[in-house]
Image (spheres, rainbow, N blue to C red):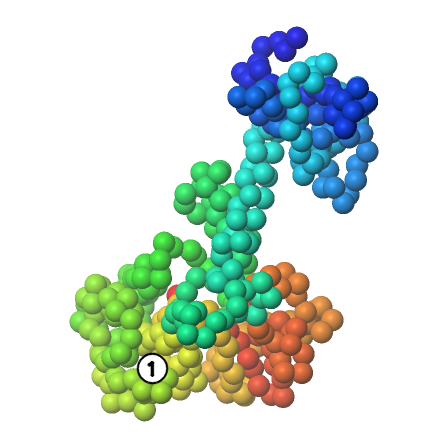
Amino acid sequence: MFGKMTSLYRGGIFRVAFPFTDADKSKRRPALALSEPDAFGDIRWAFITTKSHPSADCVPLASGDVETDLPRESYLVPTKIFTIHKDRIDHYYTRVTPKFLAALEKRDALATARRFSALAHTANRPGNDAAHAPFIPSETTVPYAGRVFTEDEVAAAVGATLDFWLTLGPEGEAMEKELAEFMGVKHCLLVNSGSSANLIAFSALTTHKLPDHKRIRPGDEVITVAAGFPTTVSPIIQTGAVPVFIDAKTLTGNADCSLLEAAYSPGKTKAVMMAHALGNPFEITTVLAFCQKYDLWLIEDNCDALGCTYSIPVDQAKSLGLDHLLKLAEANAATAPGGADEKFDSLNVESGSPSNPSTKIPFIENGILTAYTGSFGDLST
């Protein structure tokens, strides 16, 4: 009856007697076997119907999904699962292709992953998420930083693993594109860590393709902050350049920019490389003006400040050469009523202007440009 099959039941479409309280009044209808019989002879079945119900998330069984066409147009309802004994089978129709069955299994695995994450990871949800775990004084740990995600990220990670994309892959490529658009920059490249991002960004400025006065060579000096992350300083040393440290302010943890001039060495200083400390943006306008004055690179380490914003008067932004942000802010104002952009709603980033919280960043309001940190430097990580 079953023909040549790698699995006797799993993947087959059968007519099954769906039992009611009175087994003699069972209704016979097609179903897809999702498993082989267990020790008790029970099989998991997915319901098949001839009517598509949008609310039931039906999947059409097209001719390319089955070995032989079914008698009628049919739809699989993957959320409608039953456990029925193998003895209730009274007819074999056909079987779905391995590709269709694999897609169905992946769908089920992702649904399971989402349910698991919704239960297990409530403490990792964005702070403004209604499903976030409640804060209990004297009990809830308050980390200085942490992973923030929902079941969407978990499902994406599980999906990539199921497809065995252990490197960049479609999810990574999508993130590069969407993050660049979100930040308001031309390009975004993903690497394995923030440390590697700093090394790659800094190393890019050592290339022979740059003019000699802009190329960073061994012995050149780079201004950075004394109290910061080692991974902001490591690339400077690793490429043979010399870090020149300026002190940090105790209130913000960021560089004391009044010390920049004293740290500058004519003919030696080639760049400034700083991180925004723990979500506190450093004095971007001061640093940009300093870099512009001496034609220096600015490598902006944004690892701890993704999603933070910085505001600059429009006239000052123009003088600092922030044309890319000004143009994008004008484009945001001209598109989508109110400036809203549903694409990034799921990011749960509290953004927008005071008068219109849904405005997409960057934006201009009352002569002030507001943009994300990470979009100001020549290179940002």
- Whether residue 269 appears in this view of the structure is no
Q: Which of 11 and 160 is in front in this view?
A: 11
Q: Residue furthest front?
A: 22
Q: Where is residue 189 in the image (x, y as percent from the top left)?
A: 43, 57
Identify the image quadrant of the C terminus.
bottom left
Q: Specify whether 176 is left or right of 273.
A: right
Q: Position of residue 119 (x, y in %)?
A: 53, 54
Q: Specify whether 154 is left or right of 222.
A: right
Q: Where is residue 342 in the image (x, y as percent from the top left)?
A: 66, 63
Q: Specify whether 75 is left or right of 67.
A: right
* Amino acid at circle 1: Gly
Q: Which residue is drawn at 48% across and 48% down?
A: 157
Give the residue number, with chain letter if any, for mark 1: 253
Q: Residue at x 41, y 74 (%)?
A: 138
Q: Position of residue 8 (x, y in %)?
A: 58, 15
Q: Which residue is drawn at 77% across and 28% down?
A: 20
Q: Which residue is drawn at 79% across and 40% down?
A: 53
